[in-house]
Image: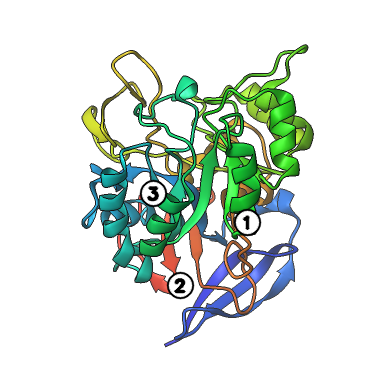
Amino acid sequence: MSRKLEGLVLAPHGFITGTLEFGDDGRISSVAGLPIDEERVRGHGGALILPGFIDLHVHGGRGRDIMEGGDAAAEVARCHAEHGTTALLATTMTAPHEDLARAFEGLRDAVAARAHGAARILGVHLEGPFINSGKLGAQPDFARPVSMQELAALHAVAPIRLVTLAPEVPGHMEAVQALTRAGFRVQLGHTLASYEEGVEAMARGARGVTHLFNAMTPLHHRAPGVVGAALAHARYAEIIPDLLHVHPGAIRVALRAIPRVYCVTDSTAATGMPDGEYRLGRHAVTKCMGGVRLDDGTLAGSTLTMDEALRNLVERLGLSLADASRRVSTFAAEYLGLTDRGTLREGAWGDVVVLDRDLRLSDVFVEGAAIGHTHAA
């Protein structure tokens, strides 16, 4: 049975006052209406209908961690769907091969078939183990050089869509090229690379940066580092807009310098849970005062959700709603090469969020199916 939504729809060329319909196949069948100036959108009073959020960096949620394996990924995807995320990449930690193999076995079915009430898991973001042991951040100390055999074995179980890599590790610059040619998205992260090494890796095919500013060589005017390489040369970069990982001023710098900055949560098992201890791979982490940290105080992922990210962009950073929507949805879809997500147009998947004028969720649809309970606050 087809479903019709009425309100202010963010169509590909701007907001319209009209309707959006999707049919039994879960795809959008019609988008129709009259243009409205965005300055009038928030004051209009009608429902705000945006593309569903897409999060390419998700470690956990509601007490579950992707590295657990089993049914953890499905529960994590349900948690984030309730906050408007309609598609995501399950993100693994740096770990021994046996830990990664267990996680991937759990992801096999979760990627193949969407669980009821859950976001679509598009595949895996392999954040480790091919990183620099000198820039672990909150990653456990199991970093190692790229092994194409290990990567191929994991990919055969569940599809790897994105690989974080430190290009300065011996052999990794060549691996950037090999991975790119094999069809993987490669991005720079957990790295001690110089500016020059960052630029070379991008020239060899690396297309993005993992949680920009965090766990990488910083910008200095005589040693620009990976941050400088990204600001000067990258077209895409992920950033965590919880306003704890990155100062709002630094986010503004990134928005001016990198055309397609998109938001991720880097969320952990502590997301949606009370303060206390949780797991992040082999690490114990503590949630308190709005953050998640290791015992030594190192930030260890976040408790951010994508609906909160949208509100931060609009209310704290001053972005227009259309621009903020692109940064929590459209640009991530573009980065993965997806043409049927992150946009509200005929033929695209019915991945839709409905918000009120205060940007609180009222409805979420994943591939045309309604998600039962959403978090309005």
Left/right placement of residue 255 relative to residue 30 reads right
Q: Nearer the viewer, residue 160 or 57?
A: 160
- Name which residue lies at 50% across and 49% down: 56
Q: Which mark identifies residue 376?
A: 3
Q: Which residue is mark 2?
A: 367
Residue 84 can be seen, yes or no:
no
- Name which residue lies at 59% across and 52% down: 179
In the rendering, at what x and y percent does residue 137 appear?
44, 24
- Name which residue lies at 38% across and 49% down: 376
Quarter occupied by residue 117: bottom left
Q: Mark 3 touching mark 1, by CB under 8 A?
A: no
Residue 297 can be seen, yes or no:
yes
Q: Is residue 214 above or below residue 79?
A: above
Q: Amino acid at mark 2?
A: Glu
* Mark closer to the chain start, 3 or 1: 1
Q: Is residue 82 above or below residue 274?
A: below
In the rendering, at what x and y percent does residue 171 appear?
58, 37
Q: Disc 3 or disc 1, which is closer to the eye?
A: 1
Q: Which residue is mark 1?
A: 330
- Location of the N terminus (image quadrant): bottom left
* Mark closer to the chain start, 3 or 2: 2
Q: Nearer the viewer, residue 70 or 87?
A: 70
- Location of the C terminus (image quadrant): top left
Q: Is residue 280 above or below residue 288?
A: below
